[in-house]
Image (cartoon, helix red, strand yellow):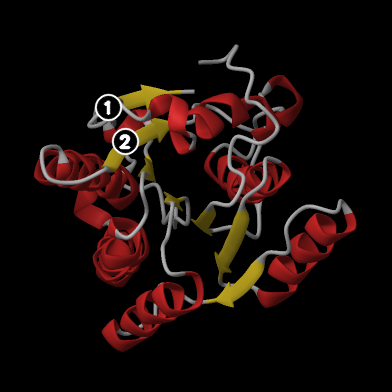
Amino acid sequence: MESYNAPIDLLKDKTILVSGAGDGIGKAVAKAYAQHGATVILLGRTTSKLEELYDEIVAANYPEPIIHPMDLQHASEQDFKVLGENVLEQFGKLDGILHNAARLGPRSPIQFFPYEEWMQVMQVNVNAAFALTKELLPALQAAPSASVIFTSSSVGRKGRAYWGAYAVSKFANEGLMQVLADELRQTSQIRVNSIDPGATRTNMRKDAYPAEDPNVLSTPEDRLPLYLYLMGNDSSEVTGQALKA
């Protein structure tokens, strides 16, 4: 997938929601989706970051994106319902979701892991991903072909000491991906997969490994081919797969 060369009109006339779009991989992927023709719904917690990305996309003459600020940690069920209704009303369909928003939480032994921090990580990484998917499914089902991508991690595929709630949440993301893919496999045109982006030069990686030299890491832009492949129609037969960029 690293050598996938996406045609420039790969996502023409598609509408795609990217959570965690204000920074890191989410920002790079959202911009790439717009570059390849999509109208991107930029969902994130920090409005100023979303506005900065909006300006970059518009300045590049890509399709004008939509900004939707949302704090996933504190969003209510009604907030998710309203988003789903608005997307269906405004666009008539949704062609894809990239679940990229995540909270790292402390790296700590389970015995000493703070209860409140555990709940916050699970809320952002798991519960919000469930709620977004659930409320956006009617819009996804209205599309001729749709793709849902969950962001995973190596510690969400093989547990590792001291990764606590983050690792467990990524195992949960993999489980949600598999269950949803199996439910939709025979009855829907929606495909569901996960991507482990690997070690990437992001702020979250810096928080996890503060002593690491970021210059030895791949950039978010290096990861784009797989994100483009899974969101475009070339991957229409791929579902239920745990892939690594």
Name the image quarter holding residue 88.
bottom left
Residue 58 screen position, x and y as percent: 83, 61
Choose between 143 and 136: the one closer to the eye: 143
Of residues 184 and 143, the one nearer the viewer is 143
Q: Left of 99 or right of it: where is 20? A: right
Residue at 41 percent of width and 56 percent of height: 105
Type of the residue with mark 1: Gln
Circle 1 SS class: loop
- On the picture, is 95 further left or further right than 161? right
Which numbered disc, 2 or 1, marks the residue that appears first in the sequence?
2
Expressed as whole percent of the image width and height from the top left, the position of residue 120 reads 34, 68
Instruction: Decide which of 214, 170 is in the foreground and name it.
Output: 170
In the figure, 73 relative to 19: above or below? below
Query: On residue 221, which mark appears?
Result: none
Q: Residue at the location (38% across, 85% down)?
A: 82
In this view, the residue farthest toward the right is 59
Give the CA separation, mark 2 to mark 1: 5 Å
Q: Compare residues 87 and 198 and report the one nearer the observer.
A: 87
Name the side, left or right, on which 231 lies relative to 30: left
Residue identifier under label 1: 241
What residue lies at 83% left-to-right and 64% top-to-bottom? 55
Residue kind at label 2, given as amino acid type? Asn
Assess whether mark 1 and mark 2 are in contact (beta carbons under 8 angstroms): yes
The residue at which mark 2 appears reads as: 193
On the picture, is 130 further left or further right than 200?
left
The number of callouts visible is 2
Residue 198: % across, % down: 49, 26
